[in-house]
Image (cartoon, rainbow, N blue to C red):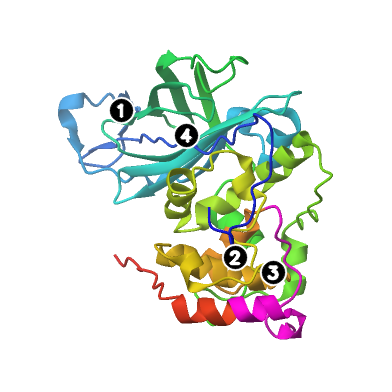
Amino acid sequence: MRKCVAKGLKIGTVLLCCCVLNVGCGVQRTYREDKTEEVIGGELADDGQGNSDDDAKTIETDYQFFSGFWSEGGISHEDLLRDGGIEFYVEITDQNELSGWIYAQQGGTERFAEIDGISCSIEDGQCVWPFTDDGWGNSGTLHIQLKQDAIGITVEDFVLSDENLSGYGISGSYTLTRSSLTQVSDLQEQTQPLGAPDMENQSEALEASDMEAQSELPEQYSADWSEEHLLREIGKRGRYREYCSFYSEWLDYMENVREVRDISMYVEPLYATDTIVCSREDFEDVPPLILHLAKNEIYARHGYIFKDTDLYNYFMMLVWYLPEVTPEEFDDSVFNETERHNLDLLKELDTYERVVLTP
């Protein structure tokens, strides 16, 4: 690493389970001419009038119903963090394209595993997704079945990693129902992102006072936290990853360029721009996104509340960040000379332009 890069925190052998299990299947609806009958999960629902399958007419299915949060017993995310369980987030696009993640936490030990980046096409109410790591090095195939009011997940061909001495991971079978947090919109209302420096506002900003009322504020990070405390706080902030469009790009950089694959990536800033005077050489071959984040983390260190949706969600997933100051109240006199130098340099180098996909 170059001299300007922040030093990573040593967390022993605790691994970040950065792969959130995402799979999806759907409901295939089959209608008669009078639209009184449907097929759900491949089984015909009788309309009570004795009509036969020959009278049915199959139409293209929209699985949008399954978008949202699902969990064993329908427990909330907060209950899962307290008592353990499994949570499945589903997003459906183009009627049958499923993406999402699975997060599992063990009660008592607070071990957690997750599989992220799931993306598959639903056919006949089901789909499969092979995974190579659930955060513990285990592999297998997720078989997802979408039912009328539930999602069934079975982990097939599960292989326990030789390095996983705990035996923990995502395996077995689960029947999931709607979580207490039922829709993506519910989560967005609780975590509506705010402000960003020198960036076009990507969403309507909330007043700072509203944010505190709608979402529990994160704790102020302390280097004295135990590993259990740190993992718990990272788990609380995990939901913000799903609303950051460049999360996978950032994660790929951290894992494959910096070779950081533990929880330290959520604990330390990208660069020590508050204490080390950086040079252009420090940022050679650094991707535009990372330069953009390095510039904005100078603001984030001082609690700047970003109006840009992705920036807000990115920094909220990092335990060192605490949103405290609205853009209107922010005073750049808080920057020290080192930060001012590095900010001027990064403003010159920042060429990042977000690609916005439109339907």
* Residues at discs 4 and 1 in contact (Cβ within 8 Å): no
Query: Residue placed at 52% from the left, 64% from the top?
Result: 310
The span from disc 1 to disc 2 (Cα, nearest Å) is 54 Å
Give the crowd class for mark 2: few <14, some 14-19, many >=20 residues within 10 Å. Answer: many
Q: Quadrant of residue 328?
A: bottom right
Compared to 81, does 205 lie above or below?
A: below
Q: Nearer the viewer, mark 4 or mark 1?
A: 4
Identify the disc placed on residue 21.
4
Residue with the mark numbered 1: 49
State yes or no: residue 337 in magenta.
yes
Residue 197 seen in the current view: no
Q: Kindly identify the amino acid type of the residue bearing the numbered disc 4.
A: Leu
Q: Nearer the viewer, mark 2 or mark 3?
A: 3
Q: Quadrant of residue 154?
A: top left
The span from disc 4 to disc 2 (Cα, nearest Å) is 24 Å
**Which numbered disc, 3 or 1, marks the residue that appears first in the sequence?**
1
**Which numbered disc, 4 or 1, marks the residue that appears first in the sequence?**
4
Magenta range: 319-342
Residue with the mark numbered 3: 274
**Which numbered disc, 1 or 2, marks the residue that appears first in the sequence?**
1
* Residues at discs 4 and 2 in contact (Cβ within 8 Å): no
Identify the disc placed on residue 312.
2
